[in-house]
Image (cartoon, grey):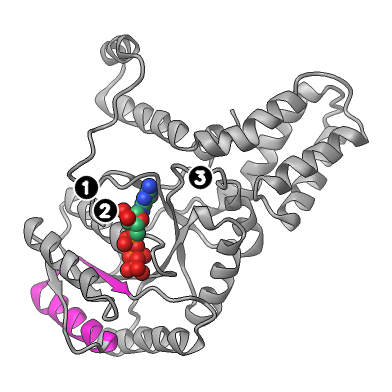
Amino acid sequence: MFDFFKKKPFQPEHEETTEQVDTALTEAQVAAQSWSERLKQSLSKTRKQLGNQLASLFGGGKIDAEVYEELETILITSDVGVNATKNLLADIKNRVKVQSLDDTVQLKAALKEAMSDLLTPLQKPLDTSGQKPFVIMLAGVNGAGKTTSIGKLAHAFQAEGKSVLIAAGDTFRAAAREQLQIWGERNNVHVVSQTSGDAAAVMFDAINSAKAKNIDIVLADTAGRLPTQMHLMDEIAKVKRVMDKALPGAPHEVLLVLDANTGQNAVTQVKTFDDALGVTGLVLSKLDGTAKGGVIAAIAEARPIPIRYIGIGEGIDDLRPFIAADFIDAMID
Ligand SMILES: Nc1nc2c(ncn2[C@@H]2O[C@H](COP(=O)(O)OP(=O)(O)OP(=O)(O)O)[C@@H](O)[C@H]2O)c(=O)[nH]1
């Protein structure tokens, strides 16, 4: 689960390039640059699926019905989804008309602009400054990456100088609880857990403990569940209500973790968890190694919930805030 310490830090492919850049750019600029390089590398399968096909379509020539038809097929087969594809095409056709575009070479910019209009509104970084403790509940199907994301988030918040407490609310999987305990001990993060099997009780204890200890952030893990398991969806809604009893207004963020590999199924997950819980933010995990990154557009179309973070690996630094322009560049360029 926590493969954080095994991974080597990212090595740029061309050492000389980094050295040259080093002298000219600040450390922060270099870090930002290597992250966007990493993002590109991680989205390479999606780019192969989407970007390479688009590259041949946008190679030059007249824009006609056949081009639009092919564009539609590429988008749909790249997990963009039927509705998002339809709306993106309408947007592109409008741009072609308004800007009097006539060559397919110009379509790439039009598509990127249309994608940007769809995805940029979802670029809303999580602001935890308004509450103390700020309680973040993580939900999702089994194996989506909740527990791993908790480790990554704890690390990121600690790096910002914030104190973190973890509520090990996955009472179904003893291994998940134990892993969190071990990880918490190693990283100086207090983990509240119980062997009783009552997730709501764990949350209640954790929030009270965070209040007593003057903790900044509570990260609440929950057991994985399928949207079709109605009793478990009811259970997680109850867990949420109990949090509000322990601290009125909590949880302040309900993060749904989605495995990008699940493609269109992620859209169903968003709808069902949102209906049951009122999801306030998304984590799109495992974007590395999937060709289905286009699903981000389908999600944006179906439920425009802010994408707080994207996950591109198992390393502790592999979760970052979502930046629409970087994502679109990595997916299409
Ligand atoms: N490649 C890759 N693997 C990831 C990423 N995020 C999580 N994983 C891996 O996905 C697997 C499942 O992650 P977990 O964090 O255990 O998932 P979970 O949602 O807590 O699972 P349950 O406790 O079963 O509900 C682990 O092997 C993680 O290392 C990611 O962004 N990229």
Q: Residue 171's spot in the image, x, y percent?
A: 26, 81
Q: Residue 191's spot in the image, x, y percent?
A: 14, 71
Looking at the image, tell me whether mark 2 or mark 1 is earlier in sequence order.
1
Quadrant of the image for the N terminus? bottom left
* 42 magenta-colored: no
According to the picture, the residue beneath numbered tag 1 turns out to be 4
* 217 magenta-colored: yes
Please name the amino acid that badge 2 sits on.
Lys
Mark 2–mark 3 Cα distance, whole angstroms, equals: 20 Å
Quadrant of the image for the C terminus? top right
Q: Is residue 45 left or right of residue 146?
A: right
- Res 146 visible: no
Mark 1–mark 3 Cα distance, whole angstroms, equals: 20 Å
What stretch of residues is rendered in magenta?
Answer: 199-222
Q: Nearer the viewer, residue 326 or 120?
A: 326
Which residue lies at the image location 47% right of the left edge and 79% below the top edge?
277
According to the picture, the residue beneath numbered tag 2 turns out to be 152
Q: Tag count in the figure?
A: 3
Check contact, mark 2 vs mark 1: CB within 8 A: yes
Circle number at residue 290? 3
The crowding category of the residue bearing disc 2, from other C-alpha atoms within 10 Å (few below 14, some 14 to 19, many at least 20), is many
Please name the amino acid that badge 1 sits on.
Phe
Q: Nearer the viewer, mark 2 or mark 3?
A: 3
Circle number at residue 235? none
- The local secondary structure at tag 1 comes to loop
